Image: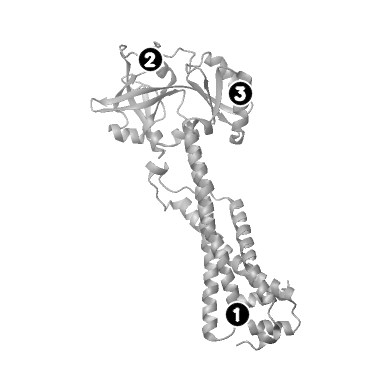
Amino acid sequence: MALRFEQFVALRYLRQARGREEGRRFLHFVTYVSVGGVAVGVAALLLALSIVRGFSREIEQKIVGFGAHVQVESLTDTPVQGATALAYGLAAEEGVARVAPVVQEFALLRRSATHIDGIALVGTDTLPPYLARHLVEGTARFGPNPEGLPGLVIGSRLARLLGLKVGDRVTAFSMRNTGGDLSFSRLPRVKPFYVAGIYETSFANFDELYVFTDLDVARALLEYGPDEVTRFDLTLDDPSRIEAVAERINERWGYPIMARTIYEVYHSYFAWVNLQQSIIPLVIGVIILVAAFNLIGTLLMIILEKTREIGVLVSLGASPKRLRRLYLWLGLLIGGVGTLIGEGLALALALVQQRYGVIPLPPEAYYMKTAPVEINPLDFALVALVALSLCAAAAYIPARVAARIEPIRAIRFY
């Protein structure tokens, strides 16, 4: 396809600038700086967006892995009564894929007199699938060992704190007060267990806190009735319908049943992620803005270097409109090359991080060992559009300057 006049000349200008040798070298350098500035800005913004998206995905997966998309519990701060009937009703709700009855209370876990820690003891039929996939030792089954002790699955951080390994014997103390008073005269219930498995999600707060065991064993230790649970964890077919499903359950079942989304239960974690999503791209986006305005200086220097040629073009019939289009195209070419390089660089770095995890993170602060990355084609398209739009806007001022050059004075320019 034949190039238009403006495109042809702009491409020639980008490939090489004619004129004095010193000027040509400096012009090349400034052009490369402009291309590099756009490329760095685009790459930085895309990597930031990919990492923030990865954080959001990982945090949601971890939290849902410990709980579910929707949690159904009692508003009265007492166990849910009639759990069997309610479980059947919740399973029949549209969009609900899995209903897991859960008993959860605070307890103490002791290995020895000097190794004791507070835990959230969770009784469930089976270990949540996410945690089963993240077992680093042992098994996900809670079945008794040869001594008849029920099994516990604990987090790796708790295992390190208490010096536990698979097969070790521990003792759990129930601190639940079912008498309705605040006295401590009643002795806690005690139950021996063995460590059946150890999971690791790098979610330090959770890996240290949550300990899982069989539902009926937890009921007995925590003094729950056979048809009582703390809550139900609901996993949905379509996570995008979390709000709608929770609202429908609240309307259908009413008091004292309450359904809460995972975003409500763990609001602080998601607020932290949302803050990153809003601030980091904005801050890094300034890099593209600076690079785009740097383009103004580059184009003005090209105009200065090409003043005589502009005069010749005007004397040969090039209209001011064509000159404006010429420098707009030149700005878009510089911005386009920079954007293409930046997107290629961002994609390559994101793929390397996905495969090899070369950027480590402290799990205590970020809840994961390496920076997560999620590549979204829409981000690449939007960033390219924004970068090219800014470059076109930045090129408009030099384009107007070029269009106002008088041919006679330009031809005499040295």
Per the rendering, the mark at residue 289 is: none
Residue ID for mark 2: 177
| Depth check, front residue: 386 or 90 | 386
Q: Quadrant of the N terminus?
A: bottom right
| Depth check, front residue: 222 or 192 | 222
Foreground disc of the pair 1, 2: 1
CA neighbours of label 1 inside 10 A, class few (<14), some (14 to 19), many (20+): some
Ranked by sequence position, the earlier of labels 3 and 2 is 2
Q: Quadrant of the C terminus?
A: bottom right
Residue ID for mark 1: 304
Ranked by sequence position, the earlier of labels 1 and 3 is 3
User: Position of 5 compared to 205: left or right?
Assistant: right
Residue 22 shows in this picture = yes
The amino acid pointed to by label 3 is Ile
In percent of width and height, residue 51 lies at: 49, 49
Residue ID for mark 3: 249
